[in-house]
Image (spheres, helix red, strand yellow):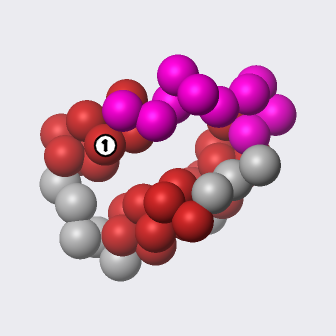
Amino acid sequence: MITKEINEWIKKVENHQYNYEDAMYEFSRFAKYLTKEELIQIKKILEKY
């Protein structure tokens, strides 16, 4: 289940509020808690941008 924090991170990435390094750092903080299906879902969302 994608949480509120992850949705906020996605919105910040979509709005270019992170540079690449900051976005990847934040992603690495929560990625270890995600399932494979959630990672695939996030990937599909971000492929649009």
- Residue located at (46% from left, 35% from top): 30
Q: Is residue 40 visible?
A: no
Identity of the residue drawn at 37% across and 29% down: 28
Residue at point 35%, 77% (across, down): 15
Per the image, label 1 sits on a secondary structure element best described as helix
Instruction: Reply above or below: 2 against 13.
Output: above
Residue 2 percent location from the top left of the image: 69, 53
Q: Is residue 45 above or below residue 28?
A: below
* Magenta residue span: 29-38
Q: Is residue 7 above or below residue 47?
A: below
Q: Main secondary structure of the magenta part?
A: helix
Q: Which quarter of the figure has residue 29?
A: top left
> Is residue 25 something that shows in the picture?
yes
Residue 23 location (% of width, % of height)? 29, 47
Residue extending furthest toward the right? 37
Figure disc tally: 1
**44 on left or right of 5:** right
Q: Which residue is mark 1?
A: 26
x and y percentages locating residue 48 in the rendered image: 61, 63
